[in-house]
Amino acid sequence: MKKILLTGATGFVGKNVQKYLENKYDVTGIGSEWDLRNATKVSHAFDLFNPDIVIHAAGSVGGIGANKDNPGKFLYDNLIMGTHMIQEAKSRNLSKFIMLGTVCSYPKFASVPFKEEDIWLGYPEETNAPYGIAKKTLMKMVETYNEQYGFRGVNLIPVNMYGPHDHFNLTTSHVIPALILKIKTAINNKHSSITVWGSGSVSREFLYVEDLARAIELSIETNVGPSPINIGTGSEISIKDLVNLIADLMGYQGKIIYDSSKPDGQPRRCLDTSKAKKLLGFEAKIGLEEGLKKTIKWYEESINNGN
């Protein structure tokens, strides 16, 4: 059984990926107890766990507000962690290194749907540019290490994700958990309205996190190179329609107010996923409504269980 070292295992993505893969692989997950910004600690982790495969899912990340407040931290943390991980993996001649990138790396005004070859055609959306640039640089590092050293790396670019174990708070959450929390709070406190950041007119594509885990599994099992591969559903929804859908699923009938003084972020996000289908045989299986139901159910159960 191949041994996998999974970084970011205590985070939202990591928890779901580990649960999905551990029936098939010997997965060791490490989290914030290992400071991957420290090269000595990274080397020690490789010595201790001796992996065949690394999945690098660790990152400093958050929603629009967190990105605005932490541009330097997000650029430094993500860049230095990934650099140490890739360099150490290269020196150990691993069978595979899977780098999880981000849709935030794409240019702000990229043609929709986003195609992998367009990722360098412009500057990312300003509020999350430091995070996106760090991840994009690491993606290029995987490619150049393959070119120069034969490094067996894979670059996956997931779209916005959601699902169980996400971060449900109003300061660092991404849009779906933030909306679920906001609506749940309004229901519990009998608030007649909720306020949502931005105009609601921008669009996003959302991937249920279990689908990402399946894409990672396919990338382990498929002989695929380091050229970036979009991982998503290939369909988008406006934030207004998303808010209405979540409100309907949760039974909230109050007024929804849009605060257009707050940033919208990137105007549209929708990936061209044809490369993932061609190279990995990957297509998302879980639709948005089904995934939202699962996420809301998990969140409500976690509240009831005191988590």
Image (tube, rainbow, N blue to C red):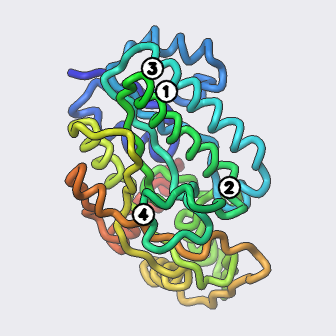
Residue 194 position within the rendered picture, expressed as x and y whole percent measured from the top left: 66, 81
Query: Few, some or many C-alpha atoms within 10 Å of disc 2 (few <14, some 14-19, many ≥20)?
Result: many
Q: Check disc 4 and report the residue beneath it.
A: 115
Q: Secondary structure at mark 4?
A: loop
Distance between the alpha carbons at the discs numbered 4 and 3:
28 Å
Residues at marks 2 and 3 touching, judged by CB atoms closer than 8 Å? no
Q: Earlier in the sequence, mark 4 or mark 1?
A: 1
Q: Secondary structure at mark 2?
A: helix
Distance between the alpha carbons at the discs numbered 3 and 1:
19 Å
Q: Earlier in the sequence, mark 3 or mark 1?
A: 1
Q: Considering depth in this image, is 67 or 183 the residue closer to the camera?
A: 67
Label annotation for residue 117? none
Q: Residue at x 60, y 25 (%)?
A: 36
- Residue 269 seen in the current view: yes
Q: Is residue 257 left or right of residue 158?
A: right
| Amino acid type at mark 1 | Ile
| Amino acid type at mark 3 | Lys
| Amino acid type at mark 2 | Ala
Residue 236 position within the rendered picture, expressed as x and y whole percent measured from the top left: 43, 76
